[in-house]
Image: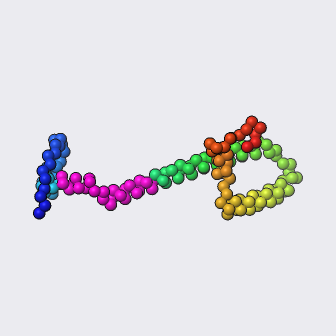
Amino acid sequence: MAVKQRLSVYLDAEMMAQLEKLAVKERAAKSSIAEAAIISFLTADDADRWEAALTRRLDRLTRSIDRVERDLEFSVEALALYIRAWLTATPPLPEGAQAAAQAKGRERYQSFVEALGRRLAKGQRLAKEALEEIEPNSSDEGFRNDGNR
């Protein structure tokens, strides 16, 4: 049997009442309960390690969601601006030109889908490029007055 050393601990009345109630309920000595609590506090158990790992993972996911939210907000705003400009600048077509315009629209849409597929296959992202232009690195000189980069 190992020799134990004495430790005096001062607890407030409420904490002492809880300790005594637990000791009666568990039929254990108050010092045994206090020793178990101290051991638990001093040694990281699997639950603590799991909680820390989960917290780190949740933090990474939160940052990732924040980036997705920012990118989505950018995309929605860009689309809204484009639609507004298109609706403002596009005059209505005469009835005789509708069929030709629809055929040309289908052709342009097919070209658009093919270009989009090529960019996605290569991993290119226009939104990323646009964000890099909007938020230039500190090494960039930014936009010059003549509109060139």
Residue 108 inside the magenta-drawn segment: no
**Looking at the image, which is closer to me, 28 or 133?**
133
- Secondary structure mostly seen in magenta is helix
Which residue: 19% across, 45% down? Answer: 15
Q: Residue at position x 18%, y 41% from top?
A: 12
- Expressed as whole percent of the image width and height from the top left, the position of residue 75 reads 64, 49
**Between 34 and 61, the one nearer to me in the picture:** 34
Residue 141 can be seen in this image: yes
At horizontal 67% and vertical 46% (from top left) the residue drawn is: 133
Residue in the image at 83% along x and 54% along y:
101
Q: Position of residue 29 (x, y in %)?
A: 12, 55
Q: How many marks?
A: 0
Q: Position of residue 106 (x, y in %)?
A: 78, 59
Give the quarter of the figure containing the N terminus. Answer: bottom left
Q: Position of residue 33 (x, y in %)?
A: 17, 54
On screen, 112 above or below 87? below
Left or right, residue 67 beside residue 75: left
Q: Quadrant of residue 108?
A: bottom right
Is 83 rendered above or below residue 145?
Answer: below
Q: How is the image coloured?
A: rainbow
In magenta stretch: residue 57: yes
Q: State whether residue 106 appears in this view.
A: no
User: Bounds of the magenta span?
Assistant: 34-58
